[in-house]
Image (cartoon, rainbow, N blue to C red):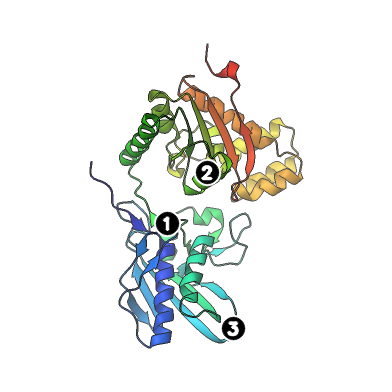
């Protein structure tokens, strides 16, 4: 099987366009190409297209990933002030605005996520180290594309979100990904590991590296069931499944494939467990109205029901062990957006074998 081609995120495109706009202002000519290093350490050097005075565009290339934004045009314009000051952000046509609390940005802000903002800021500061700069980011046709995403449901209105945590898009072919996961697990097993951590992405891996440095971690994307199957077949004696509530709560509801196209049920699962703890209706209604589970963490803790995360971890462990028919214990650990432990469950020895 040939390797699938990787691509670059809308955040990388926006940062490259902001860099090109700054260079145009400084040098008096729009550059044909720019180059920047992504958080993943890859060099991104797209072709730049001028769309208007100091407005620079780049084509989003998602590689072999079936991304809704693949092939779209991302653009940016940098307005540089005379005085010193911060880099600020504005949503152009096709980029959404945050309208509901619970996301990573406050209400009213342009839907340009934190890592893309950092990338854009580094790009701007490489040209204008101290001056105040307003960066407007847009996506041609983004308003229509956003209707094919979860943005309207999440309270992001008017367009797409500018996303990315590594700057790189990794292909999401299911066959290729599950085979890659199995191969990586096989390598870890052949290297002598008998326990392994399964994480959903790079943020979970970074958190586990700090919290459990003795465990090797394998990224499994959304493929919980396939990864557990492979771990059992390869002879691992214990697995730790770790990640943020958005994924693990789905597992606690019985989902072994956590991609949104296979279903959701996060709110319903969390509400069911809070109700079993006799949580007040007001808290259950708040969970129902929330755009993300991360947005409910503080409110649940303030209400005195933080143990719900441990209950959910135990339930996720039970579903994980049912998947592998008790072949190995499946521990769980739920992490918040900062990589701190919300709840955890370790399967006791007497539960390690099914009757």
Cα–Cα span, label 3 and label 2: 39 Å
**Is 47 situated left or right of 114 in this image?**
left
Earlier-in-chain disc, 3 versus 2 = 3
Q: Is residue 141 visible?
A: no
| Vertical placement of residue 321 versus 162, above or below | above
Residue 222, percent across and down? 44, 40
Number of labels in the image equals: 3
Q: Nearer the viewer, mark 2 or mark 1?
A: 2
> Which label belongs to residue 309?
none
Residue 141, percent across and down? 39, 67
> Which label belongs to residue 209?
2
| Vertical placement of residue 252 versus 58, above or below | above
SS of the residue at dot 1? Answer: loop
* Residue ID at (35%, 79%): 51
Cα–Cα span, label 1 and label 3: 30 Å
**Mark 3 closeness class: few <14, some 14–19, many ≥20 residues within 10 Å:** few
- The residue identified by callout 1 is 40
* Residue ID at (39%, 83%): 24
Q: Front-most of 125 and 288?
A: 125
- The residue identified by callout 3 is 84
Dot 2 and dot 1 residues touching (CB under 8 Å): no
| Vertical placement of residue 101 versus 272, above or below | below
Dot 3 and dot 2 residues touching (CB under 8 Å): no
SS of the residue at dot 2? Answer: helix
SS of the residue at dot 3? Answer: strand
Instruction: Name, please, the residue furthest toward the top.
Output: 355
Residue 187, percent across and down? 36, 34
Earlier-in-chain disc, 1 versus 3 = 1
Residue 47, percent across and down? 30, 71
Earlier-in-chain disc, 2 versus 1 = 1
């Amino acid at each position: 099987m040939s390797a699938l081609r990787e691509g670059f995120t809308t955040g990388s495109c926006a940062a490259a366009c902001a860099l090109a706009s700054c260079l145009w202002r400084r040098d008096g000519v729009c550059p044909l190409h720019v180059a920047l290093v992504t958080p993943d350490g890859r060099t991104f050097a797209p072709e730049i297209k001028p769309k208007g005075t100091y407005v620079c565009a780049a084509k989003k290339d998602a590689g072999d990933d079936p991304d809704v934004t693949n092939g779209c045009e991302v653009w940016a314009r940098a307005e540089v002030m005379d005085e010193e000051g911060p880099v600020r952000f504005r949503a152009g046509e096709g980029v959404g605005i945050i309208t509901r609390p619970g996301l990573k940005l406050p209400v009213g802000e342009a839907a340009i996520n934190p890592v893309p903002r950092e990338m854009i800021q580094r790009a701007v500061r490489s040209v204008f180290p101290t001056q105040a700069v307003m960066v407007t980011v847009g996506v041609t046709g983004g308003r229509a594309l956003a209707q094919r995403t979860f943005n309207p449901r999440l309270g992001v209105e008017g367009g797409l979100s500018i996303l990315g945590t590594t700057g790189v898009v990794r292909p999401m072919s299911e066959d290729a990904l599950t085979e890659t996961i199995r191969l990586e697990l096989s390598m870890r097993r052949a290297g002598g590991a008998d326990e392994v951590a399964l994480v959903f992405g790079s943020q979970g891996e970074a958190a586990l590296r700090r919290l459990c440095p003795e465990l090797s971690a394998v990224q499994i994307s959304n493929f919980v069931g396939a990864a557990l199957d492979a771990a059992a077949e390869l002879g691992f004696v214990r697995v730790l499944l770790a990640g943020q509530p958005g994924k693990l709560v789905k597992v606690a509801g019985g989902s072994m494939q956590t991609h949104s196209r296979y279903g959701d049920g996060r709110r319903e699962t969390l509400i069911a467990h809070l109700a079993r703890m006799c949580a007040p209706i007001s808290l259950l209604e708040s969970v129902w109205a929330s755009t993300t589970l991360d947005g409910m963490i503080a409110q649940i803790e303030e209400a005195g029901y933080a143990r719900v995360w441990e209950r959910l971890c135990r339930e996720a462990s039970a579903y994980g062990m049912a998947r592998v028919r008790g072949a190995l214990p499946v521990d769980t650990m739920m992490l918040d957006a900062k990589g701190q432990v919300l709840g955890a469950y370790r399967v006791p020895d007497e539960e390690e074998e099914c009757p």
